[in-house]
Structure formats: C-alpha cells, structure tokens
Amino acid sequence: SSRVAGMEIDVNELLHRWAPRCVPWHTQGACRAALDCPLVTTCIPAGEVVDVYQREFLALRDRLHAAEQESLKRSKELNLVLDEIKRAVSERQALREGEGNRTWGHLTEDPRLKPWNGSHRQVLHLPTVFHHLPHLLAKESSLQPAVRVGQGRTGVSVVMGIPSVRREVHSYLTDTLHSLIFELSPQEKEDSVIVVLIAETDPQYTSAVTENIKALFPTEIHSGLLEVISPSPHFYPDFSRLRESFGDPKERVRWRTKQNLDYCFLMMYAQSKGIYYVQLEDDIVAKPNYLSTMKNFALQQPSEDWMILEFSQLGFIGKMFKSLDLSLIVEFILMFYRDKPIDWLLDHILWVKVCNPEKDAKHCDRQKANLRIRFKPSLFQHVGTHSSLAGKIQKLKDKDFGKQALRKEHVNPPAEVSTSLKTYQHFTLEKAYLREDFFWAFTPAAGDFIRFRFFQPLRLERFFFRSGNIEHPEDKLFNTSVEVLPFDNPQSDKEALQEGRAATLRYPRSPDGYLQIGSFYKGVAEGEVDPAFGPLEALRLSIQTDSPVWVILSEIFLKKAD
C-alpha cells in the first residue's frame, strides 16, 4: 500500500484483480485464456505478470511523488511573491517621501524590477528607465501623457517635436505653428506630424494652451497633422535635490535638467511615428519648402552612418535624427540628465562612438563630422527674445539663415500708394509695393488705412497680402478688411452685386463707396476679384480696431485681369 499526492494505492489488490485472467503457460487452454487478458498479449507465467505490474505502478508512484514535490515548490514561490508584493506596497510611501535617489544596488533588488523565473534566482540585472528615474515607480501613470489631443498619426516620413513651456513675458508658440504649417504643401501635410509638448504640470495652464491650439488649428488637429501632449505631473523628479555644477545657480541647473527630461519624453512619444525625427523649439520661424529640403538632404546622404543632420546652427533647433537612433539617445541623456545641458550631451554621444582617446582633438573632430552633418543655409531662425528661463534675455540669431526672399517674378500695376500709418525708418510702403523691401509701421489704430490708387482704372483678377515676416512674425495685421473702389457707379452693376431676391448687397459698402471683398486671417489676405466690378479706381486695406503690435506688410501682390 502507498499514499501518493493524497491517493492511497493498494498494489496487491490491483494485482489480484487482474492476475487471474492470465494463467500459467503449461495449463490446458492457457494460450486461449491469455488472449482474453487486456494487459498481456502473450502467454506469460503468472509470477512474471505480477512483477510487470508492480514495476509499472512503482514508476507511476514515483512520477506522482515528483509532481507533488514540484507543486510544493511552486506554492513556496507564490508565497515569496506575495511577500515581495507586500513589501513593495509598504515601500510606496517611502518612495513618495523622497527615497527616489537610492543606489543602483538597492534598485536592482526592487521586486518591481525582477522578472520572475522558475528558480527565482536572478543573475543579471538589466537597466531600465526606472534605474535612472526611480521615482516613476511610485505611480503607474507616470509615463502616460496627462493630455493627448490629435489623431495618433503614424507611418509618416518626418515627425517634428516642439517642447513648449510657460514664459513670463510672451509666448511664441502659435506664431511658430503658423510658420511651420503655412510653409507645408498639401502633400507634406499628409506625410508629417507636428507634436507639441506642453512641458508644464499645472492642469489649468496646459488646458488653456491646449484649447487655444484647438481653436486656432482645428483642421490640422482633425487631419492628424498636429498633436498636443503634456506629461504626467509624476514624470518629473524632486528638483530640490539637484547639485549645482559648472558654476550655474540652482535655478539654472533645475531649468536645464527639466529641459533634458522634456526632450526625452518627446522623443519617447515620437519614435514610433515616423522615419525621421526633427527637434525644434517653440520660438522659431521656417523657410519655404523646409520639410522637403530636410527629407531630400537625408535621403541623399551617401552613407547611413550619420547620426545628426543639422538645419540650424543654434542650440537644439533643426536637429534631425533617425527614429531608430532615438532609444540610444534617450538612454544616454537619461544617464546624465542632471549633469550637463543637452547640446553637451549630444557631443559626448558622438565622442563615445567615434573618437579615439589616443588621437588628438583634430582627429576626433574629423570623425565626428561624419556623424554630425551641417546643411546650409539654415532652414530655421530663432525669433524669441524672452527665454523660458525666467529673467533671461537672449537675442540669438542664426547668421546662416539669411533674409526672407522677396518674390521678384511679379510686377504690381502702377499706382499711387499712401497710408495713415507712421513709417518706421526706411521701411516705406513704396518699397514694399515695388517688391524691393517690406513695409514696417508703428502700432495701428482703428480707422488707419493703406491705399493703392491706380494711375489708370484697371480690372484686377486676384490679390494677395502677407503681414509679418520671418524675423518679426508677430507684427501682423488683425481685423483688417480688403476693399475696392469701382471706377463707375457700382449701382450700374446692381444685378451682379446683389444676392438673392431680397436685393441684399453681397459686398458691404463703406460710407465713401468702397466695397469690402476680403479680410485678413492669420496675417494673410487673399482672394479673387469679382469681374462684375469692372475697372477699379483703388484698393484699400482698412484697419477696424486698435492693434497691440507694430505692423509689417511683407508681400503685396495685385494681379491684373487679362
């Protein structure tokens, strides 16, 4: 008799139950009887049959015993797991109270980082983001965006990342987005994503900025071109524990440390969205065709060994990476995010990859030049004056950017130009109309105007006006209408100018006879001129309300009808 895994087996009883069916081989009819035996296919003496069955059941007992032992072992391991979970829960409070700076050795023993295996004995400890940012373990949502607006577009060629923080004086974010989006062709808008990271943890501020972007760029949000995200408030560590370094005050160390983490969060979010990732800032303007230029430059590289393509010489503006390299870059930044600013860390990555300590600095620079390739002229210009670091004024300009190119291929019809605005220095309206320069004037007020009176009445086919420019994108015309003055009495073309049976004027009329045919939107006014007007005597831009900024008229385009 034997007990295995809770079952008692009487071997003799089992043998007695089956053995009589198989009789000794010399008995009369033994072979015929043996054919009825379900376990014996030949005539075997009864004693040997007992031995066969006994060996079978002993083997079965051994297997059941081994299973029982394995079950007990698993039970013990589950109890160990339960104990570890209890310990992890008890450590949560300690983590919240500042034990986020534990050593690497302590962290490798953290049960939340141990991949369980059969023996529960771990020989190798693999580093993760939690080793560099152990405070993330305190909240499961620490790596999830607190705000995420957009369509989650993936599979594009270029992803552009823009971190934006609160500025005390002036925000340039919407001007930056206007510039980036305006210079994209319809095809480029379908093959790219712009990701804005609102790198703040104040929910009221992030909500206000998000709603403003949604209101200004609804089409871009809906199409998937533009996305807005914000990190969890638990993503950032306790900055009060940072060490001062390189002679920087504590506030600057905090600023550059947080900036490094902002870049990492943005890269981690963007790396699976496209082939290339371009790092931008929230206070820049872009040149026309910037996206195609960057993409073509990347595709034309003779080797895939490059790591950074630079489209601006300033800071971290216009830096293109292959998305496949972002994981390596993020890992490196996280290892030293407290120690140095981002541009130094990028240079260190290149040094580690290609520089030989036994060679001189010139040799190192030549090697790094194969990984860090500069494109000229620059495609992005820094326009911000008030830094995101409180109290800092920086007037950095990219000398390789050049000036905004004026379109010389079109000549406006001869006209007398006049304005009620006060011109700034030599930036006159006459030069702007002749496409020699732009017009720049002091702050407009309601009732101010810009007028073009033609020397000979003429028919216009279309018009185009652009306010603001690359260096001063905020100096735009707001709430300004485009008006024309027909040469003949407009009542003669009453049928063409009326809409519907109620004889309602299609174009609002001013007291002095001008008809409104358009208005400025996002600093631009464009449209076609109704042929029913016939020859025109003049065209006027009328400012309806006071403006808070100066005004630049950078492009004037009036096309005569054939």
Image: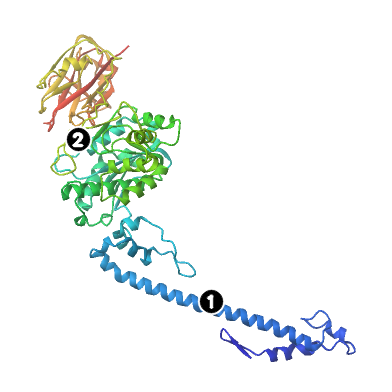
**Front in this rendered view, residue 399 or 195:** 399
Q: Is residue 16 visible?
A: yes
Q: Secondary structure at mark 1?
A: helix
Q: How much space separates mark 1 and mark 2, taking CA atoms?
A: 68 Å
Where in the figure is residue 167, as x and y percent of width and height?
A: 17, 43
The quarter of the displayed image where residue 475 is located? top left
> Along the horizontal axis of the image, is 476 left or right of 129?
left
**Front in this rendered view, residue 440 or 23:** 23
Name the amino acid, label 2: Gly
Residue ID at (58%, 78%) = 66
The quarter of the displayed image where residue 482 is located? top left
> Along the horizontal axis of the image, is 518 left or right of 23?
left
**Which label sits on residue 70?**
1
In primary-sequence order, the first of circles 1 and 2 is 1
Category of crowding for the residue at label 1, using alpha-carbon neighbours closer than 10 angstroms: few (below 14), some (14–19), many (at least 20): few
* Residue holding disc 2: 384
Q: Secondary structure at mark 2?
A: loop
Name the amino acid, label 1: Glu
Quadrant for the N terminus, please.
Answer: bottom right
Furthest residue toward top: 456
Where in the figure is residue 57, as x and y percent of width and height?
A: 67, 83
Q: Is residue 60 above or below residue 221?
A: below
Q: Is residue 153 visible?
A: no
Furthest residue toward right: 28
